[in-house]
Amino acid sequence: MKKFTTVLFLIIISLIGTSMTSFSLGIWMLKSSDSTFYYAVIGFLTIFPQILFSPFIGSLIDRFDKKKIIIIGQIVAALGSFVMIILYHLDLLKIEYILLITFLGSVANGFVSKAFYVSTASLVKKEDIGRAKGIESTAYALTTITVPIVAPLIYTIIDLSGVFLIDVISFLVSILGLLCLNFNIKKVDKEQVSYKKDVRVVLQFLKSRKGLQQLIIFYAWISLVLGGLGILTTPMILGFSNETGLGIAMTFAGVGGALGGIIMSIYKNVKLPIKNVVLLLHLLGFILMLFIIIPINIISVGILLFSFAFITAIMMVNDHIFWQNIVPYEIQGRVFGYKDLVIKIWTPISYLIMSIIIDNLAKLIVKNVPINRNYYPGSDRTFSILVIFSFIGFIILVVSYFIKYKKKFADLDVLFAEKRNHD
């Protein structure tokens, strides 16, 4: 466990630097242009490339030294920040360069995150995977709390070039630490890369375990309906508050995610991970429905976001425990790569769908729905987002209720118990 936490700590150091750069670039772009389009594109390019290339990334991870992959990924991402320092000082930093570097950085970070994810099975005992994932979830949540507070201060004091420099330094610290750290990750045979064979291997594994394909389809649906909510949170809050209120609300969310991770790092006896996920989805649906019921202010929204992030963290750790126990180590990279492609690709698609729905729904509400501004302060768009949150919450509540009684999903917990007891 000590080696796992050390590697995680080193990766988190570089992640904080990268997140500060992304945050500061967003501020710089919004100040440099009247349009928010490129700001949204940066968010899109931060996640979409690593999702799109996840099967390719997973294939290579299964065949090569994962420690080297983590280090090389860090080096490539660091070079991107170093190039931006040079371009900024030469007054040549343009939108197209930022988008290209963001794209490449996303792919590099995809290698790092996926290699570390798969390496968990080598760095900790199987019975400690839940604890390890809880610690990891807490670390990531603390990053989301820290960056929005620290990044604007550093950006104001030392300008964008200083933020880039801190990013490069954070990568150097992480890379040097990983090079000095003596840890071995299980090796596998270096077979020739064949994507057709990889697809067959993944499909054969999924078909051999009843219910896995249905579980992935269900998760893809969840990704579609929930994925867009993240991008709607900021405009919802800014519709009735300001940047300070947004910071307070997002801090609530970060604390909730951290607390959920801490609890899962302590709790070791996960026996029914899929049942837990479905039951937690019940709670998420109920919390989302409350957005249209309770009076809206920063504290009430903050509490709801805290609850949402708390439950999501516990749910995600249960899911990680399930997959890392049932998938053989030697094919985890490929299985997780294709799984992530099928599931997570719907999140950026949901961004686009939700933005279109909200714009049209706001116009419809203005014409047809009288709004009590004392109960629902803010813009028509804010009210539209509250309606969407609650409607999605109702849908999730109903669907997860019926899923709970599906035998194939219950059988997955039986499979989990068999794999865990066998190993």
Image (cartoon, rainbow, N blue to C red):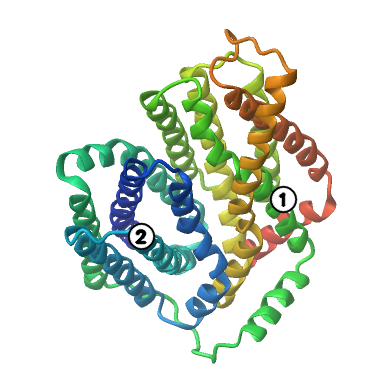
Q: Are marks 2 and 1 in contact (CB under 8 Å)?
A: no
Foreground residue, 279 or 245?
245
Tell me the quarter of the picture where residue 4 sits: bottom left
- The quadrant in which the N terminus is found is bottom left
Q: Which mark is residue 221?
A: 1
Q: Residue at the top extreme?
A: 374
Secondary structure type for disc 1 = helix
Q: What kind of residue is marked 2? A: Ile
Q: Residue at the front extreme?
A: 34
Badge 2 is on which residue? 98
- Residue 237 location (% of width, % of height): 49, 26
294 left or right of 251?
right
Foreground residue, 185 or 96?
96
The 10 Å Cα crowd at callout 2, few under 14, some 14 to 19, many 20 or more, is some
Residue drawn 56% across and 67% down? 52
Secondary structure type for disc 2 = helix
Residue drawn 35% across and 47% down? 29
Residue drawn 71% across and 54% down? 413
- Residue 353 location (% of width, % of height): 66, 46
Q: Is residue 53 above or below residue 276?
A: below
Q: Is residue 27 above or below residue 324?
A: above
Residue drawn 40% across and 60% down? 99
The 10 Å Cα crowd at callout 1, few under 14, some 14 to 19, many 20 or more, is some
Instruction: Nearest to the eye among marks 2 and 1: give it.
Output: 2
- Residue 209 location (% of width, % of height): 75, 67
Tell me the quarter of the picture where residue 173 sits: bottom left
